[in-house]
Structure formats: C-alpha cells, structure tokens
Amino acid sequence: MDISTEIQHQAMGYDRTATMFSPEGHLLQVEYAEKTVRLGTTSIGMICVDGVFIIADKRIRDKLIIKESSSRISEIDSHLIASVAGIVADARVLIERAQIVAQQNKITYDSPIEPELIIKEISNIKQQFTQYGGARPFGVSMMLAGINNRKPSIYVSDVTGNYQSYYANAIGEDDERIKEILREKYKKDLTIKQGVKIALEIFEKIKEKDFNIENFELAYINKNEMKIKRLEGKEIKGL
C-alpha cells in the first residue's frame, strides 16, 4: 500500500517543528498555519481614486454575541487600518505591536508613520517565528491599508513573513476565488463607493444564501479628509 508523501513526512517528524525543512524544501508547520488562515474570516481591500477601504465579514453566528464587540478591522493610527485572517489571539498581539510602532514614530519624528514600515515590522516578527525553535508560526495574514502623503496603499503580509503591495486583495476564506473576480472587476478609477459595491457583490456571489449584510463592517479613509470612517450592516449600502 502506497503511503502519501505528507503522511511519510509526519511519520519522520518533519512537521514537529517550524524550523525543520522537509526533503522537498517545505516548512510543514508554516504550511499548516497557512491552511488555518484560509479558514479565517474574509476581508477585501481596495485602493480607489479618492482613498482606500477594507470591508470584512464578521462571521457572527451566535445570537448571544454583541456584534459591536467583535470588530475585524482595527485602527493602527489615524491614517492606518488593518484586518486579519486566522487565529484572532495571534492577530491581537501583532495589531498591538503595530499600534505601538506607529505611536513611537509619531512621538519620535512628529509625523505619521509610512504604511510600509508597519507591515515590514509585522512581517519581520512573523519571519522570526519560522526560523527559531521553541515557538510556532503566527497563524495570521494581515491586510494593512492607509494613506501616506495623500497616496493610498494596501499591503498584505502572509504567514511566512513575506509582504507585497496591492491595488486590491482579499484574505481569509475563499480568498483565491475572490481574487480571481477582483482581477476581472477591479479598475484603477473606482471610487470608494463603487469599490464597496463591487466588494459586496463579490461577497454575495461567494456566500450565496449565507450572505447577510448585517454581518459586515466597513472602514475607509478618504485621502482628502484623512479620517477613518466606519459603517456596519445596512449602513454600508447607504455609503
């Protein structure tokens, strides 16, 4: 009976530590963490002509939970917002680190921090937890959106510590399907209002009968106003 390569690797202990490469050059614990991220709540972010936004599915199914207490989009600074997919407890540690770095920069240089410096700091922390023993990788992908010198930007950092800048992206459950649709529908001349409409249409297509506008939250920054604004549920359609 043939035994799959993955089972062989587990039997040989290649998945017992985040720092041990398999013969094929894989870090199995990191790959398992990436699977965790793809089970997480979904977010879509877009750069628009008038600013940037992130819209996220709160995925609240328990009626006993107060919806306002379960936010998926965090404020890093007055010009930066972030959403996460994966293990929420892991994400909280990284979000708090990002907030501290942003405030330290403001105190030291009396100016808002550049978005790339934040995502680089978070990515460096993630990379360290794939290289040193005694700890597991962060099971989190982070999407960071912000404005710097009136220029909107979006960065996504994955489990490994890699990051890239994007015009539009998605993290979490069904991210690959969503990105395929974004490649077709995204245009650089979209306004925030138009971008949000497209994002909601994508969510509705992906989730079908499980789509419920009340489970969504939106945070956006207009590049002229430089102020984070939030909307939830049916308020989003009134944007």
Image: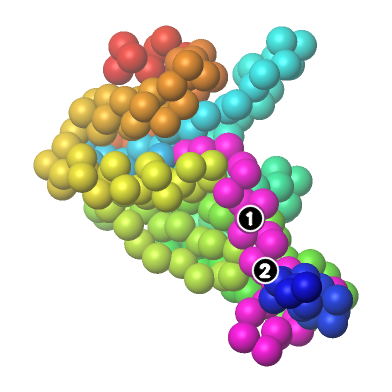
Q: Residues within 10 Å of mark 2 (few under 14, many from 20)?
A: many
Residue where numbered disc 2 is placed: 30
Q: Which sits earlier in the primary sequence, circle 2 or circle 1?
A: 2
Q: What's the CA distance linking mark 2 and mark 1?
A: 9 Å
Query: Is 85 rendered above or below residue 61?
Result: below
> Which element type, helix, strand or loop, lies under badge 2?
helix
How far across and down, in percent of the image, does residue 175 sit? 46, 46
Q: Residues within 10 Å of mark 1 (few under 14, many from 20)?
A: some
The amino acid marked with disc number 1 is Lys
Viewer-closest of 20 and 57: 20
- Determine the residue positioned at 61% across, 42% down: 40
Residue range in magenta is: 16-43
Residue where numbered disc 1 is placed: 35
- Determine the residue positioned at 68% across, 60% down: 33
Any part of residue 107 in sight: no
How far across and down, in percent of the image, does residue 195 sit? 26, 33
Viewer-closest of 10 and 162: 10
- Determine the residue positioned at 70% across, 43% down: 88
